[in-house]
Amino acid sequence: MNFLDFEKPIQELIEELEKVKKSGEKTKVDVSKTVSEIETKIAEARKDIYGKLTAWQRVQVSRHPDRPYSLAYIDYITNGSFMELHGDRTVKDDKAIVGGFGEVNGKTMMFIGHQKGINTKMRQLRNFGMANPEGYRKALRLMKLAEKFNKPIVTLIDTPGAFPGIEAEERGQGEAIARNLFEMAKLKVPVICIIIGEGASGGALGIGIGDKVLMLEYTWYSVISPESCSSILWRSWEHKEKAAEALKLTPNDMFGNKLIDGIVPEPLGGAHVNQQEIFETVKQTILKHIGELSKLPTAELIKQRIDKFCAMGVVNEG
Amino acid sequence: MSWFKRIKDGITTSTKEKKETPEGLWYKCPSCKKITPAEDHAKIAWVCPNCNYHERIGSHEYFHLLFDGDNFTELFSNITAGDPLKFVDTKKYADRLVESQKKSELKDAIRCAHGQVGGYDLTVACMDFGFIGGSMGSVVGEKISRAIDYAIEQKTPFMIISKSGGARMMEAAFSLMQMAKTSAKLTLLADAGLPYISYLTDPTTGGVTASYAMLGDLNVSEPEALIGFAGPRVVKETIKKDLPKGFQTAEFVLEHGFLDKIIDRKELKPKMTQLLGFFKH
């Protein structure tokens, strides 16, 4: 297990717990009372720490190395029936975005998500979840495929941003994202978008236009990462905490500002503490929303989606 | 012993007798350094007569260049920015807005107008780089959105002149969602069968490139304009290598297939007239 700097009290308790358990096994002494005491303490420490997370700490949790990524969610939700489909039919297969069909309770759905690597080698292969234009174009191809055969679409968002490389620019990163925004706005099938980790800027929005846009409890979504914001506005990387605060990037802020449709609760201490629990919660959330959205006539579905995004923004008039 | 000897005193003109040269009589091209009388420079669309450098101009100048007889109706001019996040960096966003409004004499980074171009009706939304780097916040999104509604209502073609560093950070996720808002609105314009011409000028980057600027039925640009998603500095830091010459210029973007055409600003009006004619007849 990995721990973040502010999780130190939890880490110490867990280490103590391990020690007690080990010595119990060795000496055959009954330690169950001590164990349950420490477990209560861990729960309390978690409640305490996670009850008052700052914006920056939330950003840290969203990047926790043990946090599950898209494929883990999709595998659970589809009960292993997920079949990955590759390629944008133009240039190549982008490994930073995955997609394909899967079955959920007897119903076929299209799953698309940013994918981060689970170890050093995979992180490189997945380009740290930073997609190139072909990733967005693959996503769009698969969404159009789903639309053609009337299958609902689920996208899972977890990216530090679209990749800012030379080839990405040559192949039209801006155009690829723009095209997705345009096309997703008028998809004829229900679209659910869930931010499961980092929701950074256009790279997140590029698969983020949906009838329901939801955020897991310990995630963030904004126009820029707090670090980059700090470096641009304060001209130094040192103000990331302040930037995270100022950007109002937490699920509560986003929901309060009517920029997302809901928040999905995570297990205490974050999704990685109890993966089964978060997978099940996300599955039930998807089923609920797709059930409701499927009842809407297509024209109404599209109209509501477009109207929702067109209402976003705050201006003064007069 | 010195080689030279000053035989006259230095500046001997008294302050009273000093002749003031009015500001702005001359234009010095930042590219070729050649000097042109400002009046002549304005007559040739603010383009350097020597090297064709396109000086950055604002909505006032573009409207003047485009609309017949400089006649147009400005739309939604009473919309200004809110400060929904009460954003503070090294300065308060609210103060920044007031300062920018004073300095630029603009209300925000975009102006919209309806007029005739070569006899054809056209609704235009034109960005102003002079207002916080032409950044896209709620005002830009709202005015584009309303201009599209207006174009649909009046059945006119639609044009956006982009000139922007991207999203306005001080409006955080609100500015991000303007990408979604404008793109969604453009689907309605497309459904109405009305042409949308996107004119990309120097610079067009970030969230503006990744939304309406790249979604034209025709994407056209000014020569040598910087056009890209990530800014050149970010790309350079990412790859840790020098960027190839001409990277992210309009010519580069055209070569890679994302622009229909590069149109010299001096040719903007006749070429726009011709294009509008193509759609009309």
Image: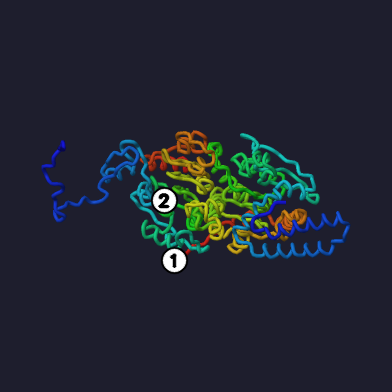
Q: What's under tag 2, amino acid-wise?
A: Phe
Residue A33, compared with residue B57, is above or below; it is: below
Which quadrant: the N terminus of chain B? top left
Instruction: Give how far across and how far down residue A104 sits, in percent.
Output: 78, 50
State the scheme by which the image is colored.
Answer: rainbow
Judging from the image, mark 2 belongs to the subunit labelled B
Both marks 1 and 2 on one chain: no
Badge 2 marks a residue whose secondary structure is loop
Q: Is residue B153 visible?
A: no
Q: Which residue is mark 1?
A: A318
- Could you tell me which residue is drawn at 43 percent across and 54 percent down? B132
Query: Does residue B276 appear to the left or right of A107 in the view shown?
Result: left
> Is residue B29 shown left or right of residue A106?
left
Of residues B199 and B208, the one drawn nearer to the viewer in this rendering = B208
Q: Provide residue B175's location: percent of width, then percent of height.
A: 52, 55
Q: Nearer the viewer, residue A207 or A33?
A: A33
Label 1 Cα neighbours within 10 Å, binned few <14 / some 14-19 / many ≥20: few
The disc at residue B129 is: 2
Q: Is residue A170 above or below residue A256?
A: above
Q: Label 1: state its secondary structure.
A: loop
List the single residue furthest toward the front. A27
Q: Is residue B158 left or right of residue A244?
A: left
Q: Quadrant of residue A86?
A: top right
Q: Position of residue B17 (x, y in %)?
A: 13, 53
Q: Is residue B48 visible?
A: yes
Say which of B93 and B75 sits in front: B93
The amino acid beneath tag 1 is Gly
Residue B238, image quadrant? top right
